[in-house]
């Protein structure tokens, strides 16, 4: 029998770079297809049942009278948040998480990363590892994930199968690399690399799932010959539904090597642009050291940036100036920042967050939020010491990123970067219900609020304003101290696929 799910309680809903809505006493209904049917923004606790009955009749008219209705009532200290979007990570590097601290990027690839990735030549190894990997990302609240696989076709098919089985939303790519990598971990030629990329795309599309899509994945410019980049660019140009992901300007040694290899190109960004790899569907990881011309080029092409602060700190790559990027991109209906109402700010230079495991040592986008905040504070401190750089009129540059911005990057911003903003990233009727039930109650064992019995009793005794303030405080505690223990349920397209409560029920 099909089910309508109704959630009753606190909801946090990102709107823009500068605004999110806090609804302490809301109702949200999810139809049997996993789509948000309606939201009641403020319901007095005495009227909940009446309201549900009223609005259920609309749904029953569409889905039949015998539909099953399942109501979840949230407790004090719990709230619903859109699922987190990880715009850049490496599934085969999860077994390496936490190792290789001593290296910078190029040495780390050679000594830590390539040896592990090469083990995925054995698809049996992939079958053993990938289910745990994907479960781990889900447990930390990632409902949509952009995955790099290895260069192996069969193992990357295993990754796609695993994601499909576990119900996560994802982009999955087979890494392309035909030079500047060890003999034991290199594709024989550009032609071979392109052929298996086409096979992977066909395979993922044959799975016929709305949740999982292929993505072109040239590892980075250094590991691709011009023939390979050209071939991938041709594929991107001829198929306007194909996403593209790669790394850019992460580390100074990497940039110098890239410029040496492609000295006919004007810049690192131009290596990709001249091969038709920069467009609205392109996700560029890192962008720590892009210069002004490159940022302009990225913006002009519509490509966006995955900010990976955990990895950028861990591999000593540097600190991306995200505030400056957001300022640069802010334009609404042709009007620049100064003239727009705060509530409407969106960024044309799309930015999301990436865990970038195992350059990053955590699969958690909540950790990425914490490090993005610290990165913005460090950049602000640096700029404060050099007044000529601190633009007075800036909205974000030289300032710490506010909670609204961090939340946006982790949800709606990430969704926009993946061209999925009409489907996920916030709660609106018609969007998919990709969501988390978060708890900061004492029984989670992690950031916790304690309240005396009856003190808040479902926020009934509080004014609307008090309830909103309290919910804001809970959100901040979760974002800066939370982890998987605080994530009770993880939903993708209305289906519960993870969280501590699901794990509990699997154990019994
Ligand atoms: O953080 C990174 N992780 C990688 O695996 C990689 N490959 C190229 N450049 C990279 N950067
Ligand atoms: Zn990466």
Image (cartoon, helix red, strand yellow):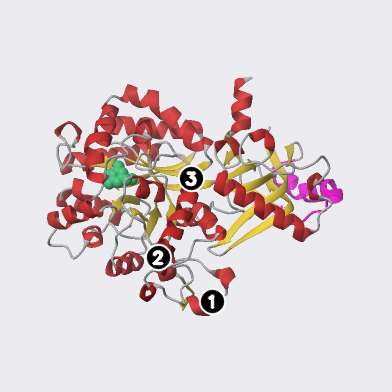
Question: What is the magenta range?
Answer: 39-64
User: Residue 464: horizontal and vertical position, in percent?
Assistant: 78, 59
Q: Mark 1, mark 3: which one is toward the viewer? A: 3
Q: What element carries label 1?
A: loop
Does the magenta stretch mainly form a helix, a strand or a loop?
Answer: helix
Question: Which is closer to the viewer, label 3 or label 2?
Answer: 3
| Residue 50 belongs to magenta span | yes
Q: Tell which of 350 and 464 is nearer to you.
A: 464
> Do the residues bearing badges 1 and 2 touch, measured as CB atoms within 8 Å?
no
Q: Which mark is residue 103?
A: none
Q: Earlier in the sequence, mark 1 or mark 2?
A: 2
Compared across the picture, whether 163 is left or right of 279 comes to right
* Left or right, residue 340 beside residue 231: right
Instruction: From the image, tell me which residue sits under label 3.
Output: 367
Q: Specify whether residue 151 is in view.
A: no
Q: Mark 2 points at which residue?
A: 325
Q: Quadrant where the N terminus lies?
A: top right
- In the drawing, does residue 109 fall left or right of residue 215? left
Q: Do the residues labelled 1 and 3 touch (CB within 8 Å)?
A: no
Q: Residue 340 carries which label?
A: 1
Q: Is mark 2 within 8 Å of ligand 2?
A: no
Instruction: Name the residue at 33% across, 51% down.
Output: 244
- Of 478 and 164, nearer the camera is 478
């Amino acid at each position: 029998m099909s089910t309508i799910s109704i959630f009753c309680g606190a909801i946090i809903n990102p709107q823009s770079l500068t605004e999110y809505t806090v609804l302490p006493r809301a109702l949200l209904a999810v139809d049997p297809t996993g789509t948000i049917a309606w939201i009641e923004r403020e319901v007095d606790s005495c009227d909940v049942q009446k309201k549900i009955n009223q609005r259920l009749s609309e749904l029953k008219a569409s889905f039949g009278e015998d539909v099953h209705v399942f109501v979840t009532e949230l407790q004090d200290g719990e709230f619903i948040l859109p699922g987190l979007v990880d715009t850049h990570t490496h599934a085969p590097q999860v077994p390496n998480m936490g190792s290789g601290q001593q290296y910078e990027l190029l040495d780390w690839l050679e000594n830590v990363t390539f040896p592990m990735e090469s083990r995925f030549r054995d698809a049996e190894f992939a079958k053993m590892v990938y289910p745990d990997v994907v479960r781990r990302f889900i447990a930390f609240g990632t409902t949509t994930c952009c995955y790099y696989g290895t260069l192996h076709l069969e193992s990357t098919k295993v990754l796609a199968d695993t994601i499909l089985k576990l119900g996560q939303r994802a982009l999955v790519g087979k890494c392309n690399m035909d030079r500047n990598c060890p003999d034991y971990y290199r594709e024989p030629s550009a032609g071979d690399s392109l052929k298996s990329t086409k096979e992977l795309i066909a395979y993922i599309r044959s799975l016929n799932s709305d949740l999982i899509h292929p993505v072109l994945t040239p590892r980075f410019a250094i590991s691709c010959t011009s023939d390979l980049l050209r071939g991938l660019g041709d594929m991107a140009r001829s198929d306007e539904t194909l996403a593209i992901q790669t790394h850019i300007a992460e580390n100074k040694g990497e940039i110098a090597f890239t410029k040496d290899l492609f000295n006919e190109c004007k810049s690192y960004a131009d290596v990709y642009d001249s091969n038709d790899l920069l467009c609205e569907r392109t996700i560029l990881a890192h962008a720590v050291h892009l210069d002004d011309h490159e940022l302009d080029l990225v913006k002009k092409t519509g490509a966006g940036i995955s900010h990976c602060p955990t990895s950028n700190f861990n591999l000593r790559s540097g600190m991306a100036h995200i505030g400056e990027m957001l300022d640069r991109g802010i334009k609404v209906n042709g009007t620049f920042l100064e003239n727009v109402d705060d509530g409407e700010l969106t960024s044309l230079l799309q930015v999301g967050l990436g865990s970038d495991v195992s350059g990053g040592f955590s699969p958690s986008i909540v950790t990425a939020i914490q490090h993005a905040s610290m990165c913005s504070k460090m950049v602000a401190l640096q700029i404060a010491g050099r007044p000529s750089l601190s633009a007075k009129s800036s909205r974000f540059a030289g300032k710490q990123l506010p909670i609204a911005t961090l939340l946006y990057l982790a949800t709606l911003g990430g969704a926009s970067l993946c061209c999925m903003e009409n489907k996920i990233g916030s709660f609106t009727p018609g969007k998919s219900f990709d969501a988390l039930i978060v708890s900061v109650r004492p029984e989670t064992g992690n950031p916790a609020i304690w309240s005396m019995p009856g003190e808040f009793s479902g926020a009934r005794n509080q004014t609307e304003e008090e309830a909103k303030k309290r919910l804001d405080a809970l959100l901040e505690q979760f974002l800066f101290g939370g982890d998987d223990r605080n994530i009770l349920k993880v939903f993708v397209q209305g289906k519960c696929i993870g969280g501590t409560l699901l794990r509990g029920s699997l154990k019994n």
